[in-house]
Amino acid sequence: MLTSITTSMFGPLNAVNVVNQGESGSFNRGSFFFREEKWTVGEMAEVMYEVASRAIHYYFARYGEAAFRV
């Protein structure tokens, strides 16, 4: 599991991290989900939906929804 911990830059595993952290937001940890038992499709879908939802809300708040219209 040490490889998993170093991959997440010593951040918490199985947690959604969308916003960069640290001074000037220069620390981009990411979201890393690990466990020994197999993930179900439903569990993976829940996590992916949460990451996508938070990312969309973050970028809309930061840049405005109009920045994403084509």
Image: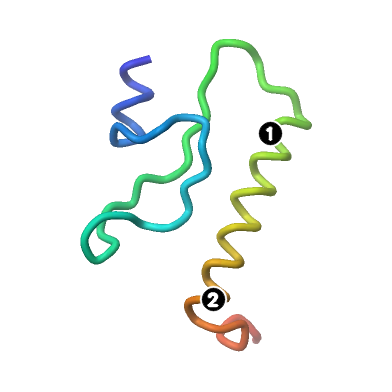
Residue hosting label 2: 61
Which amino acid does the dot numbered 1 rest on?
Met
Q: Dot 1, crowdedness within 10 Å: few (<14), some or many (≥20)?
A: few
Residue type at mark 2 is Ala
Q: Residue at x 56, y 84 (%)?
A: 64
The reply to whether the C-beta atoms of the residues labelled 2 and 1 are less than 8 Å apart is no
Residue at 36% over, 57% down: 20
Q: Which residue is mark 1?
A: 44
Q: Quadrant of the C terminus?
A: bottom right
* Residue at the limit of the structure toward the left, as seen here: 23
Q: Which mark's residue is nearer the viewer, 2 or 1?
A: 2
Q: CA distance from mark 2 to mark 1?
A: 26 Å
* Spot occupied by residue 6 in the image (x, y as percentages of width and height): 29, 28
Q: Is residue 21 above or below residue 46?
A: below
Indicate whether 25 appears above or below 65: above
Q: Nearer the viewer, residue 51 or 69?
A: 51
- Res 54 → quadrant: bottom right
Q: Spot the residue most to the right.
A: 42
Instruction: Tell me the number on the disc at residue 4.
Output: none
Query: For the point 25% across and 55% down, which residue is it?
Result: 22
